[in-house]
Amino acid sequence: MEFQEVVARRRMVRNYTRKPVDPATLARIVQTGRRSPSAGFSQGQAFVVVTDQGDRRAIAELADEQSYVQAGFDPWISRAPVHIAICVSEEAYRRRYRETDKLVDGREIRWPVPYWWIDAGAALQNILLAAVDAGLAAGFLGTHALPGLKNLLGIPDEYAPIGVVTLGHPAPDRRSGSLERGWRPDSEVIHWGRWNRDPTASGPRPGPRA
């Protein structure tokens, strides 16, 4: 599948068939998550791959899936044959940036933004796209909806889960009502050269000729 097609097909899918995911395919998807960037090659991301039915049901209970189903949605969390908890360690980044080659004036940098969260998001996107490329579907449930996930999965204190990717073969689902908002116009989102450039200009300006 061409990359642009993978990107275009990606969406949050919230229902799956009961067909299991091929283990080799699953391994490739997780490895694709590992191939995401990390500042200073800190490699602070980690993944907990959950396939046990009892554990998947327990995660669904943490998310109060029953209330979700009562609202008219499918039991997508417990039904998904694979859950992938994406985790990240802030301390792994701080340790890396205390090493000699990363010090600035003998000190750890002042972090302008928490790059560990950025890199965790990059790992998430890699997994979502890899799922589509493999002919599968995926959804994401943020950690705010999963109290007790760390204890359930035995995640060390150093690591914080950002949420769980549900993975499987797609089944017809009820799409999010948020999609009715539609895409914002490119003119509001993409800015060429400067934020408030002449609105009559469209697309990138040509670079210097060789």
Image (cartoon, grey):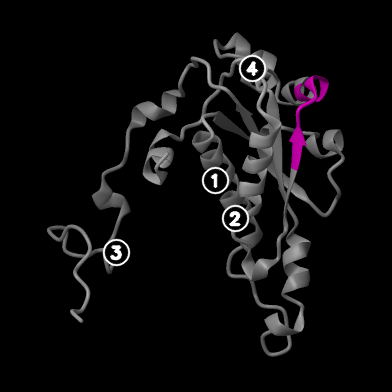
Q: Is residue 36 left or right of residue 43?
A: left
Q: Earlier in the sequence, mark 3 or mark 4?
A: 4
Above or below, comparing residue 86 to residue 207 in the picture? above
The answer to whether mark 2 and mark 4 are in CB contact below 8 A is no
Q: CA distance from mark 1 to mark 4?
A: 23 Å
Q: CA distance from mark 3 to mark 4?
A: 48 Å
Q: Residue at x 66, y 28 (%)?
A: 22
The answer to whether mark 1 and mark 4 are in CB contact below 8 A is no
What residue would you read off at disc 1?
125
Q: Secondary structure at mark 3?
A: loop
Q: Residue at x 58, y 70 (%)?
A: 112
Q: Quadrant of residue 78?
A: top right
What residue would you read off at disc 4?
19
How busy is the neighbourhood of tag 3: few (under 14 within 10 Å), some, or many (20 plus)?
few
Task: Return the mark for residue 155.
Answer: none
What residue would you read off at disc 2?
36
* Relative depth, front residue between 6 and 200: 6
Magenta residue span:
48-56
Q: Secondary structure at mark 1?
A: helix
Q: Earlier in the sequence, mark 3 or mark 1?
A: 1
> What x and y, as percent, mark residue 74?
58, 14
The answer to whether mark 3 and mark 1 are in CB contact below 8 A is no
